[in-house]
Amino acid sequence: MPVLSPDINILEKVCHKVSKIIVRDFGEIEKLQVSKKGPGDFVTKTDRKVEKIIIEELEKARPNYGFIAEETGKKNTNSQYNWIIDPIDGTSNFMHGIPHFAISIALEKNDEIISGIIFDPIKNEIFYAEKGRGSYLNNKRIRVSSRRNFDEIIGLYGCPPFKKVEKNKIFDQIKKASLSIHKLRNYGSASLDFAYVASGRADFAWYDHLNYWDFAAGKIILLEAGGAITDYSGNNFVKQKETFISNSLVHNEVLKILFE
């Protein structure tokens, strides 16, 4: 078992605390599905409630740190350290009673992600990493897959909202990939997609509409597991919307298939 740093210990305790709220509210979704109002407002309240507790707990533990959060926005981001928070990544899944979503929190130092955690409360899986110390799933070391045969690899993708689909690009990419790749999957949670590529469950993934909190924790977990991340042209990835990740072995070949 790895020795966790104080910051990872803090994140793990926070995730376990708010996961109880998420799981409880998720259990109410079935009842809400049949109401006239629907679950939308309820889910928004859950997001905000969970994020509020995460921020309160992190501010108690690290009062000098700033944060960037999906619902709340930014606070004290001139700090050397900032938390990057997504209280429920995969909100649409949560809202429809699909048990695939996660809490995602990263820590950046001087604009560089140095640690991150992704917690799937339904499956009780906690992925985490720290710079230079490797990636872990429930305290066991994880690494990207060694698959490179196109007849074996699985790709994940995030389909943007239809109003954001530009000239059917995503559909063209899916078609091209489907002609060469074993299988494609769209699971609806970018943070878990990153975790799945990092742990070898999938071999690559791509998106063109992610926000910082969607990928911040996933990025450090992927890189510490030996994965690769670039834009669609294979250039260094910073915070741009075009995001392509892989086990590194198939990176350049799949880039050519999808984007040339």
Image (cartoon, rainbow, N blue to C red):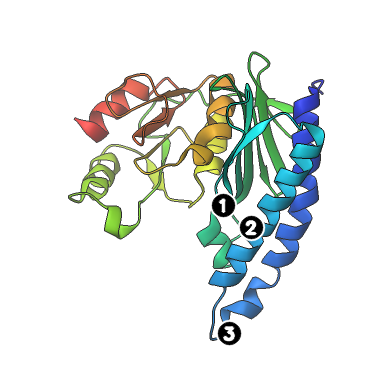
User: Residue reaching furthest bottom?
Assistant: 36
Contact between marks 3 and 2 (CB within 8 A): the answer is no
* Residue 32 visible in the picture: yes
- Which residue carries the number 3 mark? 35
Q: Which mark is residue 211?
A: none
Disc number lying in front (3 or 2): 2
Contact between marks 2 and 1 (CB within 8 A): the answer is yes
- Which residue carries the number 2 mark? 48
Counting other residues with Cα less than 10 Å from the Cα at mark 2, is it few (<14), some (14-19), or many (20 or more)? some
Local SS, label 2: helix
Residue at image point 46% right, 32% down: 203
User: Residue reaching furthest top?
Assistant: 132
Residue at image point 62% right, 30% down: 82
Nearer to me, 170 or 82 = 82
Q: Which three-letter amino acid code belongs to the residue tagged 2?
A: Arg
- Give x and y (percent) for residue 60: 81, 38
Q: Which three-letter amino acid code belongs to the residue tagged 3?
A: Ser
